[in-house]
Amino acid sequence: MVISSNNRFENLDGLKVIAAFGIVAMHVSSNMGHPLTSEIATNVIGSMTHFVKLFLILSGFGMCCGYYERFKSGKVNLEKFYIRRFAKNLPFFALLVCIDTLFSIKTVLWRDVFASLTMAFNLMPSHDMSVIGVGWTLGVIFAFYFMFPFYVFLLFTKKRAWFTVIICFVLNWCCCNYYKSVGKTDGANFLFLSVYFVIGGVIYLYKDYIQEKVSRIPTFVVLLATAVITMTWYLIPANEFSLFLR
């Protein structure tokens, strides 16, 4: 794994590009129909929605690379931290919201426009926005930004981090099996997705150990293991015990 001088894992940029293309393909397919009639191809394209979870894991890992140690040591300027989050995300997202609003001016809900521009819309009771529907992912990630200091507290030690993973898996299970059944949650709920941010953080805590072990393994073995794990994942039947994996 290549690491630049600013503690940036450059290989992950390529992984993000692959995930981005997969997500685009999934949205094009779901909105315009599958250009391929093969059931296997259809299922594969449809399953690319899970690349979103990969993005959440990478977000947790990436934020830890940049800020975990600084927050832990109390060397972060909170004002600059949050200003940077808004400066990097709000301008372009606000432009998209304005464009979508103009195109759907007769049906748009202005409360959704206002909520979207605050970047806090994932904290609303309903995450089904009438503008930039796919923007729910950014809403989840921004909720993570809001809570990042608390996130560092939860990952302060490896023991606490694993305890947090267990709690988040239980919350995920509750969302899948109880709250969803009574119509009180959906896949855009932050607590439902929080486990992926935490997994990214745990990977960060063990990054040196993982890198040391993986560097000793031949590349073809890593690729073969990845292929086997991927195929096994596709063979796991969807049920109440596997929903958080699928």
Image (cartoon, rainbow, N blue to C red):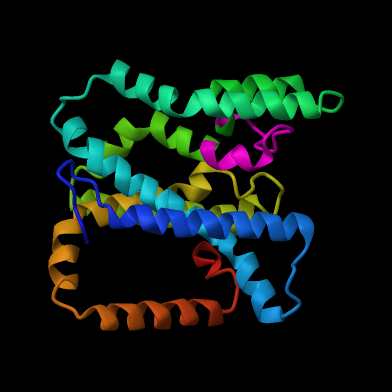
Image height of 203 relative to 240, above or below:
above
Residue extending furthest toward the top: 79
Position of residue 11 measured from the top left corner of the image (x, y, whole percent): 30, 57
* Corner quadrant of residue 216: bottom left
Q: Is residue 158 visible?
A: yes
* Corner quadrant of residue 34: bottom right
Residue segment shown in magenta? 123-138
Image height of 209 relative to 113, above or below:
below
Residue at 85% across, 28% down: 107
Q: Is residue 124 magenta?
A: yes
Residue at 50% across, 24% down: 90
In the picture provided, is 70 more to the left or to the right than 28?
left
Residue at 60% across, 38% down: 135
| Residue closest to the eye, 153 or 139 | 139
Q: Quadrant of the N terminus?
A: bottom left
Position of residue 10 measured from the top left corner of the image (x, y, whole percent): 27, 52
In the picture provided, is 148 more to the left or to the right than 72?
right
Q: Quadrant of the C terminus?
A: bottom right
| Residue closest to the eye, 118 or 6 | 6
Q: Is residue 217 magenta?
A: no
Position of residue 172 measured from the top left corner of the image (x, y, whole percent): 50, 54
Q: Is residue 199 visible?
A: no
